Image (spheres, rainbow, N blue to C red):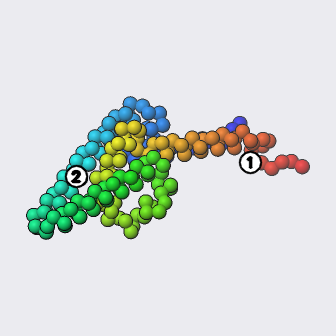
Protein backbone atom coordinates (compact mmCIF):
# COMPACT_ATOMS: atom_id res chain seq x y z
CA UNK A 1 0.00 0.00 0.00
CA UNK A 2 1.48 3.32 -1.07
CA UNK A 3 0.48 6.35 1.02
CA UNK A 4 2.80 8.78 -0.77
CA UNK A 5 0.82 11.12 -2.98
CA UNK A 6 2.29 12.65 -6.10
CA UNK A 7 2.86 16.41 -5.90
CA UNK A 8 0.33 18.65 -7.60
CA UNK A 9 1.60 20.93 -10.36
CA UNK A 10 1.75 24.64 -9.60
CA UNK A 11 -0.66 26.82 -11.58
CA UNK A 12 0.69 29.36 -14.08
CA UNK A 13 -0.89 32.79 -14.51
CA UNK A 14 -3.64 32.71 -17.18
CA UNK A 15 -3.22 28.93 -17.60
CA UNK A 16 -3.87 27.34 -14.22
CA UNK A 17 -2.72 23.74 -14.52
CA UNK A 18 -3.87 23.29 -18.13
CA UNK A 19 -0.18 23.30 -19.14
CA UNK A 20 0.25 19.78 -17.76
CA UNK A 21 -1.93 17.97 -20.33
CA UNK A 22 -1.87 20.67 -23.03
CA UNK A 23 -5.48 20.13 -23.99
CA UNK A 24 -7.73 22.28 -26.15
CA UNK A 25 -8.18 24.76 -23.29
CA UNK A 26 -4.40 25.23 -23.12
CA UNK A 27 -4.07 26.09 -26.82
CA UNK A 28 -6.97 28.52 -26.68
CA UNK A 29 -5.40 30.27 -23.69
CA UNK A 30 -2.01 30.34 -25.45
CA UNK A 31 -3.56 32.09 -28.45
CA UNK A 32 -5.36 34.59 -26.20
CA UNK A 33 -2.21 35.31 -24.15
CA UNK A 34 -0.13 35.78 -27.30
CA UNK A 35 -2.66 38.19 -28.77
CA UNK A 36 -3.03 40.02 -25.46
CA UNK A 37 0.72 40.44 -25.10
CA UNK A 38 0.96 41.80 -28.65
CA UNK A 39 -1.83 44.30 -27.96
CA UNK A 40 -0.01 45.33 -24.76
CA UNK A 41 3.23 45.90 -26.69
CA UNK A 42 1.47 48.10 -29.23
CA UNK A 43 -0.43 50.06 -26.56
CA UNK A 44 2.72 50.57 -24.49
CA UNK A 45 4.65 51.74 -27.54
CA UNK A 46 1.91 54.26 -28.34
CA UNK A 47 1.96 55.61 -24.78
CA UNK A 48 5.74 56.00 -24.92
CA UNK A 49 5.48 57.65 -28.32
CA UNK A 50 3.01 60.20 -26.96
CA UNK A 51 5.34 60.87 -24.02
CA UNK A 52 8.27 61.49 -26.36
CA UNK A 53 6.08 63.69 -28.58
CA UNK A 54 5.11 65.72 -25.51
CA UNK A 55 8.75 66.34 -24.63
CA UNK A 56 9.47 67.21 -28.27
CA UNK A 57 6.64 69.80 -28.19
CA UNK A 58 8.35 71.51 -25.27
CA UNK A 59 11.19 72.37 -27.66
CA UNK A 60 13.81 71.27 -25.15
CA UNK A 61 16.33 70.57 -27.84
CA UNK A 62 17.78 67.64 -29.70
CA UNK A 63 20.03 66.53 -26.84
CA UNK A 64 17.14 66.11 -24.40
CA UNK A 65 15.08 64.24 -27.00
CA UNK A 66 18.03 61.99 -27.82
CA UNK A 67 18.71 61.25 -24.15
CA UNK A 68 15.03 60.48 -23.57
CA UNK A 69 14.93 58.06 -26.50
CA UNK A 70 18.15 56.42 -25.32
CA UNK A 71 16.79 56.04 -21.77
CA UNK A 72 13.53 54.51 -23.00
CA UNK A 73 15.38 52.13 -25.31
CA UNK A 74 17.76 51.08 -22.52
CA UNK A 75 14.94 50.54 -20.01
CA UNK A 76 12.98 48.55 -22.59
CA UNK A 77 15.98 46.35 -23.35
CA UNK A 78 16.82 45.73 -19.68
CA UNK A 79 13.21 44.95 -18.75
CA UNK A 80 12.89 42.61 -21.73
CA UNK A 81 16.05 40.70 -20.84
CA UNK A 82 14.95 40.41 -17.22
CA UNK A 83 11.47 39.15 -18.15
CA UNK A 84 12.93 36.63 -20.59
CA UNK A 85 15.21 35.29 -17.83
CA UNK A 86 12.28 35.05 -15.42
CA UNK A 87 10.17 33.16 -17.96
CA UNK A 88 12.91 30.74 -19.03
CA UNK A 89 14.92 30.17 -15.83
CA UNK A 90 12.63 31.34 -13.02
CA UNK A 91 12.64 34.29 -10.64
CA UNK A 92 14.89 32.44 -8.18
CA UNK A 93 17.80 32.54 -10.64
CA UNK A 94 17.89 36.34 -10.84
CA UNK A 95 21.09 37.84 -9.44
CA UNK A 96 22.70 41.25 -9.36
CA UNK A 97 20.79 44.12 -10.93
CA UNK A 98 18.13 41.80 -12.31
CA UNK A 99 17.05 40.82 -8.80
CA UNK A 100 16.41 44.42 -7.76
CA UNK A 101 12.69 45.11 -7.63
CA UNK A 102 12.41 48.25 -5.54
CA UNK A 103 15.47 50.26 -6.48
CA UNK A 104 14.98 49.65 -10.22
CA UNK A 105 11.20 49.86 -10.19
CA UNK A 106 11.18 52.92 -12.46
CA UNK A 107 13.35 51.11 -15.01
CA UNK A 108 10.94 48.15 -15.06
CA UNK A 109 7.97 50.52 -15.37
CA UNK A 110 9.47 52.50 -18.25
CA UNK A 111 10.60 49.25 -19.87
CA UNK A 112 7.17 47.65 -19.72
CA UNK A 113 7.14 47.36 -23.51
CA UNK A 114 10.24 45.17 -23.35
CA UNK A 115 8.65 42.97 -20.70
CA UNK A 116 5.48 42.60 -22.74
CA UNK A 117 7.53 41.83 -25.86
CA UNK A 118 9.45 39.10 -24.01
CA UNK A 119 6.13 37.70 -22.77
CA UNK A 120 4.79 37.75 -26.34
CA UNK A 121 7.80 35.97 -27.83
CA UNK A 122 7.86 33.38 -25.03
CA UNK A 123 4.14 32.70 -25.52
CA UNK A 124 4.88 31.74 -29.12
CA UNK A 125 6.96 28.82 -27.79
CA UNK A 126 5.08 27.75 -24.64
CA UNK A 127 2.99 29.09 -21.84
CA UNK A 128 5.25 31.75 -20.32
CA UNK A 129 6.98 30.12 -17.37
CA UNK A 130 5.92 26.61 -18.34
CA UNK A 131 9.46 25.24 -18.69
CA UNK A 132 10.33 26.36 -15.16
CA UNK A 133 7.15 24.92 -13.66
CA UNK A 134 7.42 21.67 -15.62
CA UNK A 135 11.04 21.14 -14.51
CA UNK A 136 10.13 21.79 -10.86
CA UNK A 137 7.12 19.47 -11.08
CA UNK A 138 9.13 16.69 -12.73
CA UNK A 139 11.80 16.97 -10.01
CA UNK A 140 9.15 16.85 -7.28
CA UNK A 141 7.57 13.76 -8.88
CA UNK A 142 10.98 12.07 -9.13
CA UNK A 143 11.74 12.82 -5.45
CA UNK A 144 8.35 11.46 -4.42
CA UNK A 145 8.83 8.30 -6.49
CA UNK A 146 12.31 7.81 -5.03
CA UNK A 147 10.99 8.21 -1.47
CA UNK A 148 8.19 5.72 -2.16
CA UNK A 149 10.63 3.20 -3.67
CA UNK A 150 13.04 3.36 -0.73
CA UNK A 151 10.41 2.78 1.93
CA UNK A 152 10.24 -0.65 3.47
CA UNK A 153 8.40 -2.21 6.32
CA UNK A 154 5.45 -0.49 7.88
CA UNK A 155 5.09 3.08 6.61
CA UNK A 156 4.80 5.49 9.51
CA UNK A 157 5.23 2.81 12.13
CA UNK A 158 8.08 1.86 14.36
CA UNK A 159 9.85 -1.45 14.04
CA UNK A 160 8.94 -4.11 16.60
CA UNK A 161 11.70 -5.30 18.87
- Residue furthest to the right in view is 161
Q: In the image, is 96 to the left or to the right of 53? A: right
Where is residue 137 shown, x and y percent of the image?
A: 55, 43
Q: Position of residue 37 (x, y in %)?
A: 30, 45
Work out whether mark 1 precedes mark 2 in sequence or the reverse, and give the earlier one. Answer: 2
- Farthest residue toward the top? 24
Residue at position x 15%, y 64% from top?
62
Q: Residue at x 41, y 38 (%)?
A: 126
Residue beneath label 2, please?
Answer: 45
119 over 76 or under it: above or below: above
Q: Residue at x 38, y 68 (%)?
A: 103
Note whether 147 is above or below 26 in the view shown.
Answer: below
Instruction: Please state the horizontal and vertical placement of residue 29, each as a whole percent of the image.
Output: 35, 38
User: In the structure shown, which secondary structural element does the residue marked by tag 2 occupy?
Assistant: helix
Assign a secondary structure to mark 1: loop
Between 152 and 118, the one nearer to me in the picture: 118
Within 10 Å of the Cα at label 2, are there few (<14), some (14-19), or many (20+) other Cα atoms?
some
Q: Is the Cβ of the residue at disc 1 closer than 8 Å to that at disc 2?
A: no
* Separation of residues labelled 1 and 2 (CA atoms): 59 Å
Q: Which residue is mark 1?
A: 156
How many marks the image carries: the answer is: 2
**Can the viewer see residue 72 in this picture?**
yes
Image: 95 above or below 87: below
The reply to whether residue 8 is visible in this rendering is: no
Quarter of the image with the N terminus in it: top right
Q: Which mark's residue is nearer the viewer, 1 or 2?
A: 2
Q: Horizontally, is 14 left or right of 110 in the view?
A: right
Where residue 75 appears, as percent x and y from the top left, is: 31, 59
Circle 1 Cα neighbour tier, 10 Å, few/some/many (<14 / 14–19 / ≥20) = few
User: Relative to the observer, which residue lies in front, 161 or 92?
Assistant: 92
Tell me the number on the disc at residue 27: none
Amino acid sequence: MNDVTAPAPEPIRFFGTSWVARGADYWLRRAAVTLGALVTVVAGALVLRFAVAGVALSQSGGLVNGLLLFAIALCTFLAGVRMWKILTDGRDTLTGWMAEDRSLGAVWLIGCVGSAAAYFFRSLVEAPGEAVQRAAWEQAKARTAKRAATRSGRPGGKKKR
